[in-house]
Image (tube, helix red, strand yellow):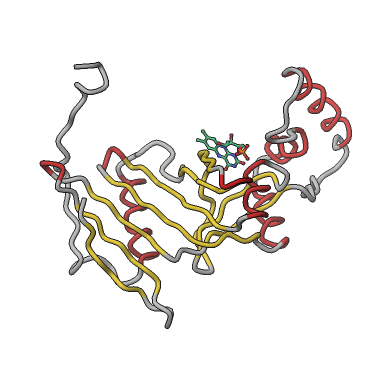
Amino acid sequence: MSKYADLRIEYKKAMLEETTVKSDPLAQFDQWFNEAVAAEIPEPNAFTLATVGENGTPSARVLLLKGVDHGGFVFYTNYTSDKAKDIKQFPVGSMVFLWLGLERQVRISGPISKVSREESEAYFHSRPRESQIGAWVSPQSKIIESRDVLEQNLVEANERFKDVDVIPLPDFWGGYRLVPVEIEFWQGRPSRLHDRILYSEHENGGWRIDRLAP
Ligand SMILES: Cc1cc2nc3c(=O)[nH]c(=O)nc-3n(C[C@H](O)[C@H](O)[C@H](O)COP(=O)(O)O)c2cc1C
């Protein structure tokens, strides 16, 4: 067999039961996230976001989760990036967290909208000064001639902001919040008989909990 097909591990670290999961998926996420942090999973807030672009073309990339509030999952990016264009056209997305060290995956899907300017301001100014300047420097997702473009932009931005105490939030930068309509928690189990617990939003605002076949 190939070097890919020969790789095989049995998942046996834990189990997940529909009778013992929390009734609120955000509370369940919080518990699993805390366990991922405690297990020292690298970048436990990293997730893959899939979006839909022109002609239904899917696109996915890794981002960092920066908050869970107002019933949703918050991340920050450039509002002129390719993902932002996708979200403008089709304001929906699907997030996947993979915490392999715990044999766990979480899938989250739902509508995406921009966070308020105030929220973006607050987060932007909590970042290190170099990261704030970095946001000004990169025309995210655009083709650039060489790395020199970034270096040159950085020199110009450092000059522009050298006497500025508070770096302004660029108009083209900020947060999005994905508010889940479905969240699935996946726990690896032996013999590929994994546990999958799906929360689906009820019309009345509560959550229905089902087990899915692996
Ligand atoms: C671990 C990791 C974390 C990342 N975090 C972010 C992030 O929080 N925001 C962001 O805009 N890009 C982040 N990126 C870069 C994105 O994956 C992507 O390259 C960028 O956002 C452009 O995506 P787009 O062209 O689809 O818009 C991260 C990449 C990695 C590997």
Describe residue 195's horizontal placement relative to residue 46 as left or right: left
Picture coordinates of residue 130, whole percent (x, y): 70, 35
Residue 45: give x, y in percent of width and height: 45, 46
Pick whichever, 197 or 164, lies toward us: 197
Q: Is residue 22 left or right of residue 49?
A: left
Give residue 207's position: percent from left, percent from top: 35, 74
Q: Position of residue 61 (x, y in %)?
A: 52, 38
Q: Residue at x 80, y 48 (%)?
A: 168
Q: Is residue 55 above or below residue 158?
A: below
Q: Tell me the residue at 77%/38% (across/down).
A: 136
Q: Quadrant of ligand 1?
A: top right
212 to the left or right of 79: left
| 104 versus 184 height, above or below | above
Location of the N terminus by quadrant is: top left
As displayed, is residue 5 above or below residue 76? above
Residue 18, quarter of picture? bottom left
Q: Quadrant of residue 28?
A: bottom left
Locate residue 9: give its quadrant: top left
